[in-house]
Amino acid sequence: MSEVIEPNVDSSNLIADFPAINTDVKSLVDLNLRYGIKLGGYSLLVPESIESEIIASPDIFPMPNTTNLMIGLISVRGRFAPVFDLGEMLNLKLKGRQTSIIVLQLNGDFLAFPYDSAHSLELPTSVTDNHPVLPDILTQFTGDIYQIGEEFWIEFDFKRCLQQFANQISQ
């Protein structure tokens, strides 16, 4: 189950309408509650296996001589986390200047990126095959797709996506 990484003692930097789910995981699993973000017009689900956290208005420290895909570094409980422009990586334009970021914990490391909006939602029990065509760059990281009302939520493989771009950056 995707859950919020233990928040700082001062949790005022967490977005209020993005509930913490580290209190009663069993009841949330029963509800099939998931977290997702909107990025450049697409709705991406955070996989159940990835711990995630939303941080509002973090101090981002720019890194000289890095790729334009790297925005900078933030401090997450005393550890540095790189902030990448996932929208740029996927050729998805964010809607305006973003002040909040999502932090994902992958293989013990933190990675972060800005997004358009964050959501917690209850997924339907079945996936849909009746969805719009996705861009090729997005399709390669797409798993199941769920329809909630008029919106389509994509099970997005953040880990594989970020690993692929990290490999490209390091070459």
Image (spheres, grey):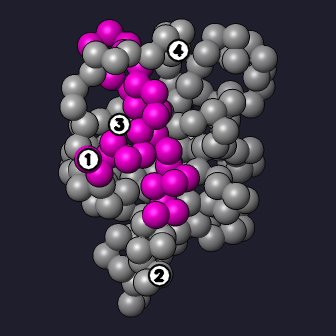
On residue 136, which mark appears? 1
Q: Split into 4 quadrants, where in the image is the C terminus?
A: bottom left
Query: Position of 110 compared to 8: left or right?
Result: left
Q: Vertically, is 118 above or below 161? A: above
Magenta extent? 136-164
Query: Position of 110 compared to 36: left or right?
Result: right
Disc 2 marks which residue? 170
Q: Is residue 1 magenta?
A: no
**N-term-proximal mark, 1 vs 2:** 1
Check the image and name the residue furthest to the bottom.
65
Mark 1: which secondary structure?
helix
Disc 3 marks which residue? 38
**Amino acid carrying mark 1 in the image:** Asp
Which numbered disc, 1 or 2, marks the residue closer to the eye?
A: 1
Q: CA distance from mark 1 to mark 3?
A: 18 Å
Asked if the residue under mark 4 is in contact with the one under mark 3, i.e. CB atoms within 8 Å, the reply is no
**Relative image position of residue 23 (x, y in whole percent):** 77, 25
Q: Split into 4 quadrants, where in the image is the N terminus?
A: top right
Q: CA distance from mark 4 to mark 1?
A: 27 Å
Q: Nearer the viewer, residue 102 or 156?
A: 156
Q: CA distance from mark 4 to mark 2?
A: 38 Å
**Amino acid carrying mark 4 in the image:** Glu
**Relative image position of residue 96 (x, y in whole percent):** 21, 49
**Amino acid carrying mark 2 in the image:** Ser
Query: Position of 162 compared to 77: left or right?
Result: left
Q: Vertically, is 53 above or below 159? A: above
Disc 4 marks which residue? 122
Image point (34%, 18%), residue name: 129
**Amino acid carrying mark 3 in the image:** Lys
